[in-house]
Image (cartoon, rainbow, N blue to C red):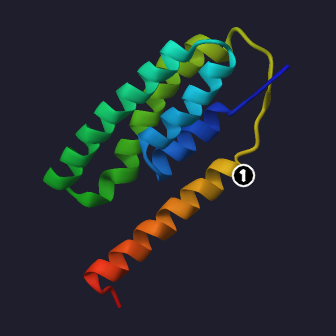
Amino acid sequence: MKTLYSRKAILGFSAFCTPIFGAFLMRYNLKEINQSKKGNQAVLLSVFLTAIIIYLNLTFDNGLAILFNFFAGLLLAELFYKKQLEDTLAFEIKPIKQPALVALAIFVSIIFILSVFYNFK
């Protein structure tokens, strides 16, 4: 039985990190079931959605970022997860410990870099 990231994990990482992060989890899942091409499509779609989200956040209220990210993750989940994984496979849920640590390391690095270059206090 395959071990894959759950739909909730993909939605959560898309909402609280970026849709790109959620798409890489989706890409891992699709690669595990020999659907690498669809995984690459998920990543490309998430890059496009992230660009739209950045534009919307710069144009409108920044407080809507999580909402926009959630909807992008929902779109990824509906287009790829539901069609490719949920209805066709029995699988075990993969723990999110490793992606959570990677996300934490990225955020800490960004905060450190910003604090060095912009002298945050």
2 left or right, relative to 54? right
The C terminus lies in which quarter of the figure? bottom left
What residue is shown at x 56% (from left), y 29% (from top)?
26
- Number of numbered labels in the structure image: 1
Residue farthest top in this picture? 88
Choose between 38 and 72: the one closer to the eye: 38
Element type at marker 1?
A: helix
Amino acid type at image mark 1: Lys
88 left or right, relative to 81? right
- The vertical placement of 17 against 9, above or below, is below
What residue is shown at x 25% (from left), y 40% (from top)?
51
- According to the picture, the residue beneath numbered tag 1 turns out to be 97
- The vertical placement of 42 against 67, above or below, is above
Position of residue 95 measured from the top left corner of the image (x, y, whole percent)? 76, 43
- The vertical placement of 71 against 65, above or below, is above
Position of residue 42 measured from the top left corner of the image (x, y, whole percent)? 45, 24
- The vertical placement of 115 against 1, above or below, is below
Residue farthest right in this picture? 1
